[in-house]
Amino acid sequence: MSAKPVRIGLCGLGTVGSGTFELLQQNAQVVAARAQAPLKIVHVGVRRDNHRCDLGDTRISRDVLEVAADPAVDILVELIGGTTVARELVETAIRNGKHVVTANKALIAEYGNEIFALADKHCVEVRFEAAVAGGIPIIKALREGLAGNRIEWLAGIINGTGNFILTEMRDQGRDFRDVLSEAQALGYAEADPTFDVDGIDAAHKLVILAAIAFGIPLQFAAVYTEGISRLTPQDVEYARELGYIIKHLGIAKQNGAGIELRVHPTLIPDHRLLADVDGVKNAILVEGNAVGPTLYYGAGAGGAPTASAIVADLVDLARDMGAGQTCRVPPLGFAREQLRDLPIVPMAEVQTPWYLRMEVEDKPGVLSAVASIFSEQGISIEALIQKAPAEGQSRVQLIVLTNKAAQGMVDLAVASIEALDTISGKVTRIRVEGLDG
Ligand code: HSE
């Protein structure tokens, strides 16, 4: 191959950084053939020496900013994570005229608007396929493959660690903490695993998907986020009896009032394809007005799958550089001046069916008191199960599945139910999505 090598500066050699280093070595030939130039890591920025890669004679710097300043680097790959040093690193690289590839969803979700504006000013590209759903090329699919569609909605399992935990809890009855430790040992979990469990990681990814799908600016602060740590095996089991599986979904929908942006545990019908997405796998269902529903499935975390997305971005960039046509596709697919200022729908107005579970006294009149509260709020009941009391117990579990109701109405109904003296404790509530439109 006669083309000049594309020179890469790689910062961070954790699970994803090492995976990228190794993949570029392992698939060097096929990657070079596709990129129409060899991709060569010429400088590595790594703060500690505890990585598994044999770096050979590659230049190594302990200060990652030296990589961003290196004139021998064409593309900086940022895999250090976080939003402080990583932001400085990326912005320095851009100011020095380097293209950037990153897997950092927090950085893109929280500071992407500013970073893209800076990249625009310096005529360089920022690519971030690896930031969402690991190895699944969902950014490219939304930005390019579905460019002819108006996207109506998307719903995805976009945190592998959370899905791994939910799957193990459901199938093996394992303890939440025990599964989380395994996900950390396997390199799936974030440095701070509360990001996975509390839905922050999924919210970062959802914001990026929604911006590309709907042509809106990145707005992390607007996402409603609810984690999985309060889910009980009991709810998982009752949901199953009703024909549902509980998944932690990121959902973005365009409706007449604006955009819904939400991450929360969700009951989905057990016959939907998303219900079969288990373990660390991710999947995103996207509904386009021309194409209809499309589903993207694969490994959402881990070294090699995430490296697959990073190398794809490098190949794309190398092709554009070779053709002298960088910045051909804007980061969010829309020109910045075309981004739309659509309102985010307040959660009180978001309508879904609901799963509600409460512990009630097993005596006449309790059911009718609960039913009349729903009726006062105009909430219609779709299904209801009352479990027989355990031996010697006077309290029973009552599970109600409602038709679509705005959260604001459900809040009022739940407050009235919790005030009844025949109810103990709080009402558990989980949203339901049919995923059919
Ligand atoms: N912690 C993330 C997950 C890694 O579990 O999905 C990939 O973004």
Image (cartoon, rainbow, N blue to C red):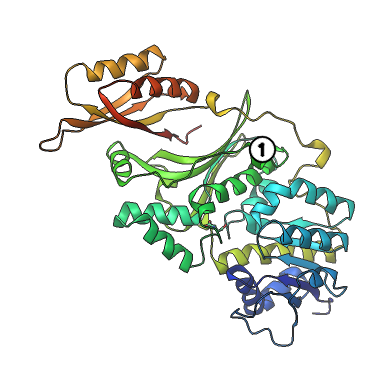
Looking at the rendered structure, the secondary structure element under dot 1 is loop
For image coordinates 57% across by 51% down, the residue present is 201
Give the residue pinned by disc 1.
149
Position of residue 335 in the picture relative to residue 136 (left or right): right
For image coordinates 55% across by 29% down, the residue present is 347
Label 1 CB sits under 8 Å from any ligand 1 atom: no
Q: Nearer the viewer, residue 377 or 130?
A: 377
User: Eyeballing the image, is 390 above or below 175?
Assistant: above
Q: Residue 371 occupies which quadrant of the picture?
A: top left
- For the N terminus, the image quarter is bottom right
Q: Residue 31 occupies which quadrant of the picture?
A: bottom right
Image spot of residue 209 (x, y percent)? 63, 45
The amino acid on which the numbered mark 1 sits, given as a three-letter code, is Asn
User: Eyeballing the image, is 149 above or below 280?
Assistant: above
Position of residue 410 in the picture relative to residue 337 (left or right): left
Residue 117 in sight: yes
Position of residue 412 in the picture relative to residue 71 (left or right): left
Q: How crowded is mark 1: few (under 14 residues within 10 Å), some or many (20 or more)?
A: some
Image spot of residue 235 (x, y percent)? 32, 41
Image spot of residue 282 (x, y percent)? 50, 53
Residue 357 in sight: no
Instruction: Give the quadrant of ligand 1.
Output: bottom right
- Spot the residue most to the left: 392
The tally of labels here is: 1
Image spot of residue 270 (x, y percent)? 36, 42
Q: Nearer the viewer, residue 193 or 238?
A: 193
- Spot the residue most to the top: 376
- Spot the residue most to the bottom: 57
Q: Residue 353 occupies which quadrant of the picture?
A: top left
For image coordinates 54% across by 61% down, the residue present is 301
User: Eyeballing the image, is 53 above or below 207?
Assistant: below
